Amino acid sequence: MVWNADLIISAAVFLAGLGLAGWMYWLEKHPPGRLQPRLFPTTLVLLLGLLMVLGGGIHLLAWAGYLPPKHP
């Protein structure tokens, strides 16, 4: 296996997105307290983390040589 910058960056984006999405999901399930609003929108950051996971995962699959099936 050849290690290059594409693989390292894709894996880092995938793992960072996974960590970000997991952290925001955990924050949404544990409210801060009574009548205290959050200072930032966790749902929007959760969506950003999921987009990072999706983009990094697709790039890792493409880097590994996976080609989607062709439709006639």
Image: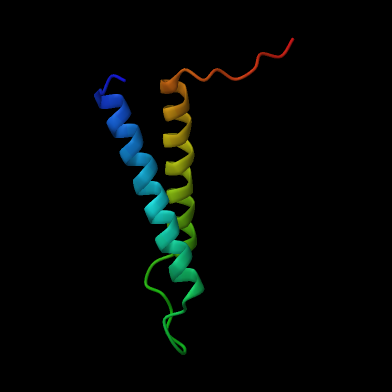
Where residue 53 sits, quadrant-wise, is: top left
Counting from the top left corner in percent of width and height, residue 37 is at 43, 79
Q: Residue at x 46, y 56 (%)?
A: 46
Colour scheme of the rendered structure = rainbow
Front residue of this view, candidates 2 and 28: 2
Q: Residue at x 46, y 79 (%)?
A: 31
- Quadrant into which the N terminus falls: top left
> Farthest residue in the right direction?
72
Q: Residue at x 46, y 90 (%)?
A: 34
Residue 57 versus residue 18 in the image, above or below: above
Side (left or right) of 71 relative to 22: right
> Farthest residue in the front direction?
1
- Quadrant into which the C terminus falls: top right
Counting from the top left corner in percent of width and height, residue 20 is at 38, 55
Side (left or right) of 62 relative to 4: right
Counting from the top left corner in percent of width and height, residue 41 is at 44, 64
Residue 17 versus residue 28 in the image, above or below: above
Residue 19 versus residue 30 in the image, above or below: above
> Farthest residue in the top direction?
72
Could you tell me how many numbered marks the image carries? 0
Q: Residue at x 64, y 17 (%)?
A: 69
Side (left or right) of 69 relative to 66: right
